[in-house]
């Protein structure tokens, strides 16, 4: 049984390669590489009619964009058209999400780190089966909301525990 310890990405030949770091009770530690996962995020057009969607797609075409796909999605129980913007490299996503493009209502999911996005899409769960791989030590991190500096338990809620 293998346990996923961590994930990151490197650049090889101008292409992003996701590395998955595993521990296996039989093989020890090893790395798997994913070479075909593409960085993407969504842009929501202001006008949902055909003309508005097409105009936004045309404005978004950029030398750092591989392609743009239309996706029908549900947003607050309403069907919307979202544009899935696939970038040539993860390093271009921050620049692309900041483009000031007429006809753009909002940008979504552009802040998800590339390797994490790969894990989410693939359904891989880090540290699953950790006991079977002989891992017995864990770290805990608690993030709190604190608008006043040093957090205090009585006023500042925990927002993430990992």
Image: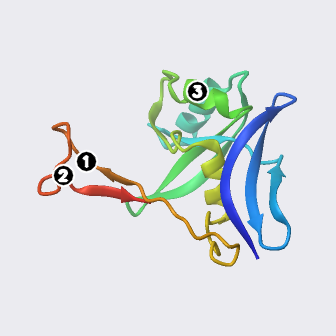
Q: Residues within 10 Å of mark 1 (few under 14, many from 20)?
A: some
In which quadrant of the rendered image does the C terminus lie? bottom left
In which quadrant of the rendered image does the N terminus lie? bottom right
The image shows a total of numbered marks equal to 3
Identity of the residue drawn at 62% across and 71% down: 128
Q: Residue 84: x, y in percent?
A: 62, 44
Residue 84 visible: no
Vertically, is 22 above or below 42?
below
Task: Residue under label 3, please give it.
Answer: 96
Identity of the residue drawn at 55% across and 65% down: 137
User: How far separated are the C-alphas under marks 1 and 2?
Assistant: 6 Å
Task: Residue under label 2, please give it.
Answer: 156
Point out the frontmost of discs 2 and 3.
Answer: 2
Q: Residue 22: x, y in percent?
A: 74, 61
Q: Secondary structure at mark 2?
A: loop
Q: Residue 73 or 2: which is nearer the viewer?
A: 2
Tell me whether circle 1 and circle 2 mark residues in contact (CB < 8 Å).
yes
Marking on residue 145: 1
Tell me whether circle 2 and circle 3 mark residues in contact (CB < 8 Å).
no
User: How far separated are the C-alphas under marks 2 and 3?
Assistant: 34 Å
Q: Residue 128 or 13: which is nearer the viewer?
A: 128
Q: Residue 83: x, y in percent?
A: 59, 42
When asked about the image quadrant of residue 14, the answer is: top right
Q: Secondary structure at mark 3?
A: helix
Which sits earlier in the primary sequence, circle 1 or circle 2? Answer: 1
């Amino acid at each position: 049984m293998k346990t996923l310890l961590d994930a990151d990405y490197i650049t090889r030949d101008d292409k992003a390669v996701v590395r998955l770091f595993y521990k296996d009770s039989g093989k020890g530690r090893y790395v798997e590489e994913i070479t075909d996962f593409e960085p993407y995020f969504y842009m929501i057009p202001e006008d949902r009619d055909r003309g508005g969607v097409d105009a936004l797609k045309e404005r978004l075409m950029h030398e750092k964009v591989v392609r743009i796909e239309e996706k029908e999605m549900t947003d607050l129980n309403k069907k919307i058209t979202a544009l899935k913007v696939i970038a040539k490299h993860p390093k271009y996503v921050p620049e692309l999400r900041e483009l000031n493009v007429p006809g753009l209502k909002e940008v979504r999911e552009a802040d998800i780190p590339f390797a994490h996005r790969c894990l989410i899409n693939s359904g891989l769960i880090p540290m699953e089966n950790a006991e079977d791989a002989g891992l017995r030590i864990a770290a805990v991190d608690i993030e709190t909301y604190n608008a006043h500096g040093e957090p205090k338990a009585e006023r500042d809620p925990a927002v993430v525990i990992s």
